[in-house]
Amino acid sequence: MLKLSGNFMKKKFKLKISVWQFLALGYFAVILLGSILLILPFATSGGESTSYLNALFTATSATCVTGLSPYDAGTHWSLFGQIVILLLIQFGGLGFMTFVSVVLIAFGKGLGIYSRTAFIESTGGRKYSGFFKLVRRIFIGSFLFEFIGAALLSIRFIGDFGAARGIYFAIFHSISAFCNAGFDLMGSVGGASLTEYAADPLVSLTVSGLIIMGGIGFCVWNDILDCRFNPKKLQLNTKIVLLVSAIFLILSTGLLLVFEWDNAFFGEKGFNFGEKLLACFFHACTTRTAGFYSTPIYTLSDSGYLLTLILMFIGGSSGSTAGGIKVGTFAVIIMGMVAVFRGKRDIDIGKKRIEHSLLSQALAIFAAFLMIVLVGTLIICAVEPQVTFKEVLFECVSALGTVGLSLNLTPHLGIASKIVLILLMYAGRVGILTLALALGEKRTTAEIRKPVDTLLIG
């Protein structure tokens, strides 16, 4: 265990706390602060206090960059409430330790081994060299992408909503898209997420680009910059993330185009081939844990619904603003499966080999994610007999994957069901592995190992 002291507590106190516990508690503290701010009367447009459970739900969803909400963000919350949500989204998207590191550096405080370890764990990194450069790149790079996104969205939104409101809408939706949060303000103008812009290339492609850049992962950015965009010098993780993400985007766009060709929404809007392709590409991007939608979710076919569940389950890249089990986890499981079926001892990827311990971790994350979804679905189905299994399963996968897409079930759920979703969102953002390590007790490995036996499988 590492000692947390000095920078985080008064010197006379010393608290033994693991890095993973510190990360989990950090997000928890931010959520509590956000919930307190959101219950204030002036946080709502009507000047009435929001119930604490719904404020806690919204704060959790914003900090965990999910997007599920019991209220429409554009109509229920005042400007103050919306700014609180936006700050929680930004904080949750960039990560707790990124902000802690930036604040400490700004005040001239040194970052010890504890702070660096927590930061590296939270961003998915593996080495301490170039620590300050990585912090700087994450902070500057994130705001650069958000600024460019806001500038592009302003072109359309200023014309639609006027200068002041258009710029505000552009900033809000740019940050929400880059952080893969999915919160939108379109309800205040009679819209539903980005359905009014389904055929608009400027808005759809800008939001899609922000979602992709936010979901790639901070360490992937860092590696690409370090290698000066030379593909041959990229780390194996970067190559796998970029390759698998590209395959998912292309394949899912094509499948959605086939599945949703006769979608009622497309027919109602009179979409041509190019507009259908744009809408399917947008949906393929947003299901990677962003939460926006340009095609109403309830209009999806059963095939489109199942594909959406799969994409939400997998999610984006490790150390990014995205959730899910992550594309790296999925890739390791698939390659491990291929190696086993071929009777190979090693898991080879090109000229490299990965350890079997990594496959064990990937399978554990997959199994834990699946079990948590099933338990959450089981509980909500038990306490909410009036809702369908299809709706509940979708909501639970969306919550744990920090996606935010919904079949409009959240506003109609009871107290117990909302608590379940809050826990799912929290577990999804902190990370299944991080949460398990935070809750687990560190024990010394026994020197004497137990005898080997076997079980029948397959």
Image (tube, rainbow, N blue to C red):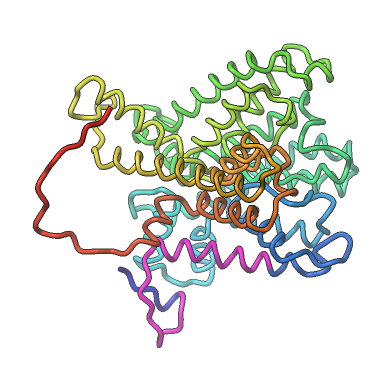
Decide: is 178 above or below 351. below
With respect to residue 387, does 86 lie above or below?
below
Q: Position of residue 377 (x, y in %)?
A: 56, 44
Return the residue found at the far bottom.
12
Q: Is residue 146 visible?
A: yes
Residue 413 in the figure: left or right of residue 254: right
Q: What residue do we see at 25% from left, 27% from top? A: 348
The residue positioned 69% from the left and 41% from the top of the image is: 387
Left or right of 172 in this view: 352: left
Residue 405 percent location from the top left of the image: 66, 39
Residue 60 versus residue 367 in the image, above or below: below
- Marks counted in the figure total 0
Residue 87 seen in this snapshot: no
- In the rendered image, the quadrant that contains the N terminus is bottom left
What predominant SS class does the magenta segment belong to? helix
Which quarter of the figure is the C terminus placed in? top left
Q: Is residue 225 left or right of residue 143?
A: left
Percent across and percent down for residue 184 are 75, 44
Stretch of the chain drawn in magenta: 8-35
Residue at x 68%, y 65% (from the top left corner): 35
In the depicted view, which residue is nearer to us: 304 or 82?
Answer: 304
Residue located 44% across and 50% down the image? 432
* Magenta stretch encompasses residue 439: no
